[in-house]
Image (cartoon, grey):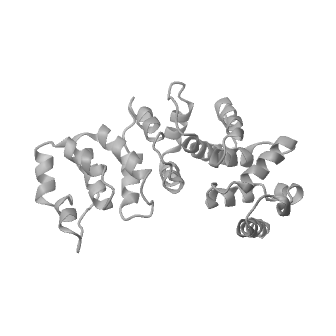
Amino acid sequence: MLDLEFADSPPLLNQFSNNSPHFRYLLTNHNVEAFVEMTAQGKPIGIRLAGFEGLMALDAQTGLECGLRIALSENPATFAMAEMYAEIADFPVNTQYNKSLTEAFRSMPVRPDSASALINLLPILRLQAWFEAPDRGWVIPTYEALVLGRLYAEFEREGKPPTERMRSTLARFAEIPGIPRAKFLARWEEPSPRYKHLMELSLEDDLLPETSLRGLVAARASYITRTINLDRLKLSEERRKRIKHFLEDSEK
């Protein structure tokens, strides 16, 4: 359990720390709804985490569902988030686990840094089981793309070819701007006029997070240097300089 003591914090926050009499009162009275409400608060993060801990003690399935939403909406560097990630990763696999991930991966708006942190800490076999499940339902493509990127990296590390579903999903991402298209470009075969056009679109995409832009440039530095004329793209001068800087870093 997270140790949620909040020195020098507002009275409301200390009221809901997991060592407070009020927190213990809610536990004793099995007040699941109060803990759910706590996880839905915007600030401070301590109230959300205390709500998560209360739920994990009373109704772990609901705790998992609320914890996933917290993980996808908070700064991953926030105090105690790592411990919450660990609790989510260690949650026993059951028939509801894939459903909980699907529901979480419908959360809007997408916060890529939070999503990446969570997906990188979940066990790879759980991610693969969720990804390959035929009946998992729709999700926002960015989440699926981040899972797919993790799977491709793991399969590559183990010397295994991607599954048919991995390849067909990757191909679909070519036409979806942002992180999905960047994942496609980083993994798909290069030589084609269509590939070049998609690469130009991604390099011009101001909504592509900088970490994704850096990763794409690192993965395809040689291709970009040989094939793409950055001076002809519709780029701000600042973005053009960043891309050239990423290319220089890739050559070191």
Q: Nearer the viewer, residue 129 or 12?
A: 12
Residue at (54% x, 53% y) in the render: 112
> Residue 175: percent from the left, percent from the top?
70, 39
Instruction: Please state if 107 lies on the left or on the right of 242 as rendered.
Output: left
Q: How many marks?
A: 0
Q: Is residue 1 visible?
A: no
Indicate the quadrant containing the C terminus: top left, top right, bottom left or bottom right. Answer: bottom right
Query: Residue 29 in the image: x percent, y percent?
Result: 10, 44
Residue at the spot 36% in from the left edge and 47% down from the top edge: 67
Q: Could you say which is closer to the camera, residue 124 or residue 224? A: 224
Residue 2 coordinates in the image, percent (x, y): 29, 58
Residue at 26% x, 51% y is 38
The single residue placed furthest to the top in the displayed view is: 135
Q: Which residue is pictured at 23% across the width and 45% down the height?
A: 57
In terms of image quadrants, where is residue 15?
bottom left
**Looking at the figure, which quarter contains the N terminus?**
bottom left
Residue 170: image quadrant is top right
Up/down of 36 relative to 166, above or below: below
Locate residue 11 relative to residue 133 in the image: left or right: left
